[in-house]
Amino acid sequence: MGQKVSPTGLRIGINKDWESKWYAEKDFSKYLTNDYKIRKYLNKKFKNANISKIIIERNAKRCEIFVYAAKPGLIIGQSGTEIEKKKEVSKLVKEDIQISVVEIKNPDMVAQLVAQNIAHKSKIEFHLELLKKEGNQKHYESWSKRN
């Protein structure tokens, strides 16, 4: 029987990067639980924004959060309700937080967003085989346009 290796752990440093970028000797467990709370809260609150990843960077003064989303307008809001969201997240983890929303230009190239789209449509009772074909076709078309 072969050895099982985590695909993310195997690719870090080659073609992937860490999702949390910070170092702590004393407060490691506190930062780790705060990262988990932040990711859980943002994914739950903005699940319709098609969030693909959340990167958290910490320095001595504050915590910076980069949210990669296909629909950033749902997160930011019409009149910049990001300030309220920032206050809610900072209350949750009791830290000074800076949130940046990054738009994903081509969501058909991100596997997580394709999977979320298929899962969402399958709840509306589409045929699963057709959804998988459609998702693969869009991915291949966007890949051929890119190259």
Image: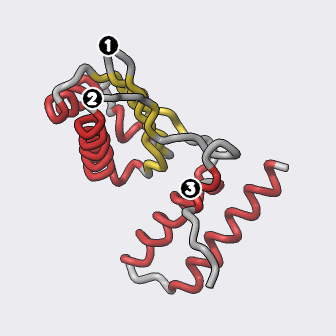
Q: Quadrant of residue 144?
A: bottom right
Residue type at mark 1 is: Lys
- Within 10 angstroms of label 1, few (less than 14), some, or many (20 or more) residues? few
Q: Sequence order check: which comes first, mark 2 or mark 3?
A: 3
Q: Residue at left 44%, top 52%?
A: 50
Q: Residue at left 28%, top 50%?
A: 40
Left or right, 12 with respect to 57, comes to right
Q: Give me the disc on residue 26.
A: 2
Tell me the distance, in whole angstroms, between the alpha carbons under discs 1 and 2: 16 Å
Q: Quadrant of residue 141?
A: bottom right
Q: Nearer the viewer, mark 1 or mark 2?
A: 2
Q: Residue at left 23%, top 36%?
A: 30
- Within 10 angstroms of label 2, few (less than 14), some, or many (20 or more) residues? few
Q: Quadrant of residue 77?
A: top left
The image shows residue 133 at horizontal and vertical percentages of 65, 78
Q: Residue at left 47%, top 43%?
A: 69
Q: Secondary structure at mark 2?
A: loop
The image shows residue 28 at horizontal and vertical percentages of 30, 35
Above or below — where is 32 with respect to 61?
below
Q: Secondary structure at mark 3?
A: helix
Q: Give me the disc on residue 8.
A: 3
The image shows residue 110 at horizontal and vertical percentages of 60, 54
In this orientation, which residue lies closer to the viewer: 15 or 49? 15
The image shows residue 140 at horizontal and vertical percentages of 75, 64
Let me know if residue 117 appears in the view. yes
Above or below — where is 32 with respect to 99?
below
Q: Sequence order check: which comes first, mark 1 or mark 2?
A: 2
Above or below — where is 29 with respect to 121?
above
